[in-house]
Image (tube, rainbow, N blue to C red):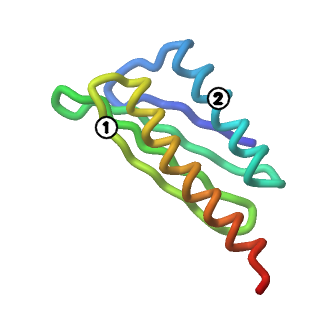
């Protein structure tokens, strides 16, 4: 899996990078069987931090989530929960054969 963690106008620290990597890898293992591409971009919007998550699955599906918060870790967690919800619904749709 190729994972890109970047900051637009700010520096991404090691603690944030390891947290992002561990959570994205667990969701990738849970919802996608084959390797995927993921991009996480952090930026500063006024007084809040913004996080944009994009994940491309090998099946052709692309999931995207965006969140903002006063804390950069909370912004990532909110965006990650939105992305995980999209992946969970997509996997359920693939398995629903009625």
> At 52% from the left edge and 41% from the top edge, which residue is drawn?
80
Q: Position of residue 65 (x, y in %)?
A: 45, 51
* N-term mark: 2 or 1: 2
**Outermost residue toward the top?**
14
User: Which mark, by number, is residue 40?
Assistant: none
Between marks 2 and 1 in the image, the one whose residue lies nearer the viewer: 1
**Outermost residue toward the right?**
33
Decide which of 95, 38 is in the foreground and name it.
95
Q: Which residue is mark 2?
A: 21
Give the left or right position of residue 44, taking residue 20 as reference.
left
Q: Position of residue 84 (x, y in %)?
A: 58, 49
**Outermost residue toward the front?**
98
Is 19 placed above or below 42 here? above
The reply to whether callout 2 and callout 1 are in contact (CB within 8 Å) is no
**Outermost residue toward the left?**
46
Question: Dividing the image into 4 quarters, which one contains the C terminus?
Answer: bottom right
Is 51 placed above or below 82 here? above
Q: Position of residue 39 (x, y in %)?
A: 55, 43
Is 23 placed above or below 59 here? above
Neighbour tally class for label 2: few under 14, some 14-19, many 20 plus, Cα within 10 Å: some
Asked which secondary structure carries label 2, the reply is: helix
> At 45% from the left edge and 42% from the top edge, which residue is drawn?
79
Q: Position of residue 97 (x, y in %)?
A: 79, 82
Question: Dividing the image into 4 quarters, which one contains the N terminus?
Answer: top right
User: Which mark, by number, is residue 68?
Assistant: 1
């Amino acid at each position: 899996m190729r994972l890109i963690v970047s900051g637009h106008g700010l520096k991404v620290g090691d603690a944030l990078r390891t947290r992002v990597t561990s959570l994205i890898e667990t969701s990738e293992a849970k919802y996608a069987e084959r390797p995927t591409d993921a991009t996480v971009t952090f930026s500063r919007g006024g007084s809040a931090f913004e996080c944009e998550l994009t994940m491309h699955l090998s099946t052709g599906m692309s999931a995207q989530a965006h969140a903002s918060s006063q804390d950069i870790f909370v912004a990532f967690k909110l965006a990650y929960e939105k992305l995980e919800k999209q992946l969970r619904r997509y996997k359920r749709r693939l398995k629903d054969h009625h």
